[in-house]
Amino acid sequence: KPAGAEAIDREDVELVPRAADAHGLLADACAAQGSWYDAEIHAVLARALAPDDASAHVRLAHLLVEGYGGRRNREAAEELREASLLRPGEPQIQYRLGVVEQALGNWEAAVTALEAFTRTSPEGPEALDAEHRLTALARQSPESPDSPPPEPLTLPAGAEARYRIALE
């Protein structure tokens, strides 16, 4: 949004301070200008004013991911989980949740969300990315059959004897 749009959105918030949509639009305008602090304030207010609106949770999650470069992904995942409960089966929420869960290292949750996305939106704009992420997650998973088995622990020759001598 251009800077003038932010001024219009601020006027809307002043006219109707309890309107979640007005705070949401202002949050978007602030984020577009790089004003992450103001964007977060208005996104939190929008969510507080409309706690049953999944889009308010998604907006806040997006700001937490983009504005903080991954440092607040746990909070973003919580917002996306809540949005998913409010709007079950929504492909974009599942995709975003899968991406954030993957970034957090929550493989099972990421796979669950990304598989839900690919079931509901196999031809969607992020479908190829979701498939790539699922392939990567299958390789990264701690219990993946593709993961090489851990190297067996071997002691250097004579280590056991030196250990026994050291104990005496």
Image: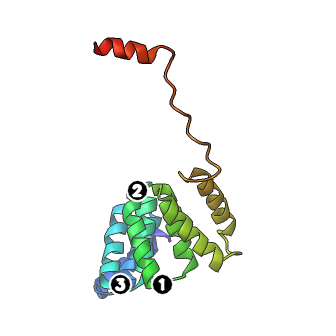
Residue of label 3? 20
- Please rate how many residues cluster around mark 2, counting C-alpha atoms within 10 Å: few if below 14, some from 14 to 19, many from 20: few
| Identity, as a three-letter code, of the amino acid under mark 3 | Ala
Looking at the picture, tell me which residue is in the foreground, 69 or 82.
82
Residue 145, position as x, y percentages in the image: 63, 52
x 36%, y 79%: residue? 23
x 49%, y 22%: residue? 155
The image quarter containing residue 48 is bottom left
Which numbered tag is attached to residue 68?
A: 2
Work out how far the residue at label 3 is from the one at label 1, CA to CA, in angstroms: 18 Å
| Identity, as a three-letter code, of the amino acid under mark 1 | Arg
Q: Is residue 80 above or below residue 74?
A: below
- Please rate how many residues cluster around mark 1, counting C-alpha atoms within 10 Å: few if below 14, some from 14 to 19, many from 20: some
| Identity, as a three-letter code, of the amino acid under mark 2 | Tyr
Residue of label 1? 87
- Per the image, label 3 sits on a secondary structure element best described as helix
Looking at the picture, tell me which residue is in the foreground, 45 or 124.
124
The image quarter containing residue 41 is bottom left
